[in-house]
């Protein structure tokens, strides 16, 4: 993690006690995804957010959340990549409203994210802008778990082997719609369920056991 990110975001190695010994198959999960105006956290803005809850092998479609985020920024390639335009974003919710809704899950669920670092840095920046403190959030990073598995199988990992699409393809999933926050959140949760079955078919592992893969992260603002 580059130095300026270390100044705004803490990566904590200690899993909160409430989650440490909970079996993976009983964890309450919240899979999240965001679309941004760019990939540079210093200038990027939230454009949309999506999340969905799950537990064991169940995905609760009734909990699906999707929102466009009101943004006053240069959209760059977003209309091409995400299909989002300035006209569509005019009716979006304020980022504070999305943040408030999401933080209600911070101590009630373990977040599931594919490539968590950018999303968590952006959430911390948003919290700072809102005068809030990002609470400690426990994350299962499906990309890091995929890299852990790939490192055991390959001397050199192909550059695109850890994308969400490539990871899903290895499990035989159909192509998921790309560049929609809710679709990607659901696709990420489906990937995690397949990964979990692969590494824990008997349902005996806990979140603490998963730490050795590097896929379990605890994020929160440095105070």
Image (cartoon, rainbow, N blue to C red):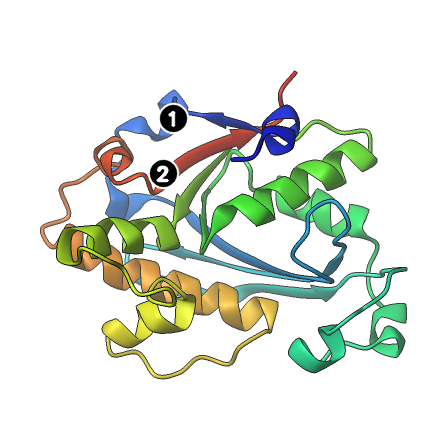
Judged from the image, the secondary structure of the residue bearing numbered disc 2 is strand
Position of 126 with respect to 114 (left or right) is: right
Front-most of 51 and 142? 142
Q: Residue 169 placed where, x, y %?
A: 30, 76
Q: Residue furthest top?
A: 223
Counting other residues with Cα less than 10 Å from the Cα at mark 2, is it few (<14), some (14-19), or many (20 or more)? many
Determine the residue positioned at 30% across, 78% down.
173
Quarter residue 22 falls in: top left
Position of 76 with respect to 213 (left or right) is: right
Residue 122 visible in the shown view: yes
Which quarter of the figure is the C terminus placed in?
A: top right
Q: Which mark, by number, is residue 15?
A: 1
Q: Residue furthest left?
A: 202
- The answer to the question of whether label 1 and label 2 lie on touching residues, with beta carbons closer than 8 A, is yes
| Residue at which label 2 appears | 216
Front-most of 52 and 184? 184
Front-most of 14 and 94? 14
| 62 shown above or below 16 | below
């Amino acid at each position: 993690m580059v130095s300026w990110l270390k100044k705004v975001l803490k990566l904590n190695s200690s899993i909160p006690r409430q989650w440490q010994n909970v079996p993976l198959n009983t964890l309450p999960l919240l899979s999240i995804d965001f679309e941004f105006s760019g990939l540079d956290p210093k200038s990027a803005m939230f454009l949309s957010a999506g999340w969905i809850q799950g537990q064991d092998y169940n995905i609760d479609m009734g909990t699906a959340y999707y929102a466009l985020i009101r943004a006053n920024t240069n959209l760059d390639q977003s209309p091409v990549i995400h299909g989002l335009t300035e006209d569509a974003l005019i009716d979006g919710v304020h980022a504070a409203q999305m943040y408030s809704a999401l933080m209600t899950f911070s101590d009630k669920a373990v977040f599931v994210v594919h490539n968590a670092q950018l999303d968590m840095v952006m959430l911390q920046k948003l919290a700072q802008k809102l005068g809030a403190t990002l609470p400690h959030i426990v994350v299962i990073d499906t990309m890091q778990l995929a890299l852990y598995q790939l490192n055991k199988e390959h001397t050199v990992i192909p550059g695109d082997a850890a994308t969400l699409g490539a990871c899903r393809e290895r499990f035989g999933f159909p192509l998921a719609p790309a560049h929609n926050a809710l679709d990607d959140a659901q696709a990420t949760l489906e990937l995690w369920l397949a990964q979990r079955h692969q590494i824990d078919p008997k349902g005996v592992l806990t979140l603490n056991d998963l730490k050795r893969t590097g896929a379990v992260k605890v994020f929160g603002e440095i105070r």
